């Protein structure tokens, strides 16, 4: 009989772990797979039955074509991409610069600024949404994609994340660059950024997802249907007197694809940054 170590789980513990993992996987992936299955079902399949089948009996892509015929889905997708691009660019530039300043530069009121950033995280977004709309309208940006993207162009949470990442970089590297005559911008570009690419990827991914999936703020700012983002435009698939769950599911899958592309493109940088740590040897 082989003796087990203190850290070796028993068969029962392994079984419980796998059951818990299976439950979490079912809760997270199950709804997505169900939407995908519904989007591939033909008009002859009853999706309202008590015991609907998970696998489509006759898979078809007709629902995706009907989505494009029902609403200008590509125009809405382009609007969402424009909003997400502005938000990502603003956070990459603004949050990175602000995070580096709070982590590495010494100036009066640094603690006060940091406290103000922390205080804004306590307030829910619904509290400031009225003041944000009044500000956007006073700037003449109501009913524009710029007005939709501007409030999320620099997130306070992203600033704090970048500050934490920059503080993890050994200060000796900054000191060496300072001795070599590098200014603040050169230290940021050549010393700071190469060591925080993992966190920067996290900022890009979550900023894109937040801007792409936002529904309430674009609904408030935009009034011209031609400028609607994809999340707002998809509501036209839910008619007043009837709703086709197949079309709604297909529209949901179309809106989900860009998120998959962005995550697939950046996840290797994120995981590489986590594995290698803040500073490469």
Image (cartoon, grey):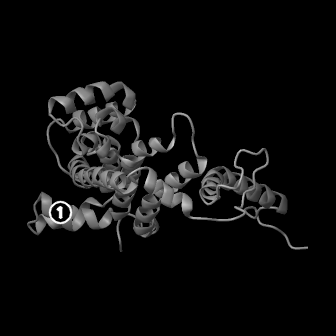
Q: Dot 1 lies on which element?
A: helix
Dot 1 surroundings within 10 Å: few (below 14), some, or many (20 or more)?
A: many
Give residue 73's position: percent from left, percent from top: 40, 54
Q: Nearer the viewer, residue 256 or 135?
A: 256
Task: Name which residue lies at 39% across and 35% down.
Answer: 216
Q: Nearer the viewer, residue 176 or 143?
A: 143
Task: Name which residue lies at 37% across and 57% down.
Answer: 74
Q: Say which residue label 1 marks.
A: 187
Classify the position of the N terminus by image quarter: bottom right
Q: Nearer the viewer, residue 233 or 242?
A: 242
Label total for image: 1
Classify the position of the C terminus by image quarter: bottom left
Give residue 245's position: percent from left, percent from top: 60, 47
Task: Name which residue lies at 61% across and 60% down.
Answer: 40
- Left or right: 94, with 16 as reference point: left
Give residue 161's position: percent from left, percent from top: 35, 49
Instruction: Report if residue 224 is visible in the image.
Output: yes
- Left or right: 61, with 188 as reference point: right
Instruction: Report if residue 255 is visible in the image.
Output: no
Q: From this viewpoint, which residue is outermost toward the right?
A: 1
- Left or right: 181, with 196 as reference point: left
Q: Nearer the viewer, residue 4 or 137?
A: 137
Task: Name which residue lies at 39% across and 50% down.
Answer: 212
- Left or right: 79, with 141 as reference point: right
Give residue 204's position: percent from left, percent from top: 35, 56
């Amino acid at each position: 009989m082989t003796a087990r170590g203190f850290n070796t789980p028993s068969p029962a513990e392994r079984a419980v772990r796998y059951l818990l993992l299976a439950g979490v996987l079912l809760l997270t992936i199950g709804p997505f797979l169900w939407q995908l299955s519904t989007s591939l079902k033909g008009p002859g399949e009853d999706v309202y039955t008590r015991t609907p089948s998970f696998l489509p009996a006759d898979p078809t892509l007709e629902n995706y074509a009907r989505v494009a015929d029902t609403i200008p889905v590509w125009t809405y997708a382009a609007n969402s991409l424009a909003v997400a691009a502005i938000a990502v660019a603003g956070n990459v530039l603004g949050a990175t610069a602000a995070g580096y300043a709070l982590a590495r530069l010494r100036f009066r009121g640094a603690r006060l600024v940091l406290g103000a950033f922390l205080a804004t995280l306590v307030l829910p977004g619904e509290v400031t949404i009225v003041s944000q709309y009044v500000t956007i309208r006073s700037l003449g940006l109501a009913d524009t994609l710029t007005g939709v993207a501007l409030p999320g162009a620099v997130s306070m949470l992203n600033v704090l994340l970048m500050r934490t990442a920059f503080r993890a970089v050994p200060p000796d590297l900054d000191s060496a660059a300072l001795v070599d005559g590098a200014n603040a911008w050169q230290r940021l570009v050549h010393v700071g950024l190469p060591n925080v690419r993992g966190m920067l990827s996290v900022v890009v991914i979550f900023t894109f997802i937040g801007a792409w999936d936002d529904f309430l703020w674009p609904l408030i700012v935009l009034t011209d249907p031609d400028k609607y983002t994809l999340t707002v435009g998809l509501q036209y698939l839910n008619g007043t007197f009837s709703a086709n769950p197949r079309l709604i599911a297909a529209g949901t899958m179309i809106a989900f694809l860009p998120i998959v592309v962005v995550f697939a493109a950046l996840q290797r940088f994120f995981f590489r940054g986590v594995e290698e740590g803040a500073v490469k040897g």
